[in-house]
Image (tube, grey):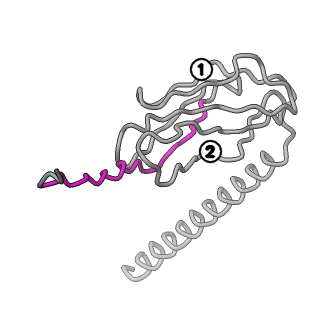
């Protein structure tokens, strides 16, 4: 009797695990299908498509040109309105179009970083738009190197007169 009960218990566990795995596979397939449908679905309303969402300044010298441009296109069907653009700190200052960007038009977000600050940096600019009220985050990064030290001219030890 114990053997029969043990065999039934084991069989139920195996069937339960198999059903659980089948459910996981079904959920994965459904999620993949939804993502595919989402990508193929036409966009109604505004849509921002950026050339780059991360701008790498690379290694630059202290005091060098701080301006970088994030270029984008409104690939949607309605005007795009940027409500605000905020830098992650006072050293990152964005400027953005205040007028609506019409469908098919290109525009840019200009970002200035304080290149008087030496060292590695990674900063963000957060955009608030009329695209489903979602926030879009742009990133700048790089390294500001100190200016090379000037060689001092040795003072003359004696007078030539």
Picture residue at 75% right of the left edge, 31% below the top: 107
Circle 1: element type: strand
Marks 1 and 2 sit apart, C-alpha to C-alpha, by: 17 Å
Read off the residue under disc 2: 53
Name of the residue lying farthest toward the left: 158
Position of 94 with respect to 74 (left or right) is left
Residue 91, relative to residue 9: is it above or below? above
Residue 148, relative to residue 110: is it above or below? below
First in sequence: mark 1 or mark 2?
A: 2
Picture residue at 49% right of the left edge, 37% below the top: 124
Name of the residue lying farthest toward the front: 161
Q: Residues within 10 Å of mark 2 (few under 14, many from 20)?
A: some
Residue 128, relative to residue 8: is it above or below? above
Picture residue at 58% right of the left edge, 70% below the top: 18
Residue 10 x/y as whole percent: 46, 76
Circle 2: element type: loop
Residue 68 x/y as whole percent: 60, 39
Q: In the rendered structure, which segment of residues is drawn in magenta?
A: 135-157
Quadrant housing residue 16: bottom right
Q: Which mark is residue 141?
A: none
Residue 128 x/y as whole percent: 61, 24
Q: Dividing the image into 4 quarters, which one contains the N terminus?
A: bottom left
Q: Residues within 10 Å of mark 1 (few under 14, many from 20)?
A: some
Picture residue at 70% right of the left edge, 33% below the top: 108
Q: Is residue 149 magenta?
A: yes
Read off the residue under disc 1: 84
Q: Is residue 22 magenta?
A: no
Nearest the viewer among 149 and 45 is: 149
Position of 24 with respect to 119 (left or right) is right
Residue 57 x/y as whole percent: 53, 49
């Amino acid at each position: 009797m114990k053997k029969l009960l043990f065999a039934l218990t084991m069989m139920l566990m195996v069937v339960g695990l198999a059903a659980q795995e089948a459910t996981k596979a079904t959920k994965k397939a459904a999620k993949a299908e939804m993502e595919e449908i989402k990508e193929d679905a036409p966009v109604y309303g505004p849509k921002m498509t950026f050339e780059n969402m991360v701008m790498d300044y690379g290694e630059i010298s202290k005091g060098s040109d701080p301006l970088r441009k994030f270029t984008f296109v409104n690939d949607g069907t309605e005007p795009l309105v940027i409500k605000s653009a905020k830098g992650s700190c006072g050293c990152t200052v964005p400027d953005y179009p205040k007028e609506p960007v019409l469908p098919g038009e290109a525009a840019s977000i200009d970002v200035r970083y304080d290149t008087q600050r030496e060292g590695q940096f990674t900063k963000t600019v957060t955009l608030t738009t009329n695209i489903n009220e979602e926030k879009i985050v742009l990133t700048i990064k790089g390294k500001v190197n100190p200016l090379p030290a000037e060689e001092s001219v040795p003072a003359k030890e004696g007078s030539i007169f």
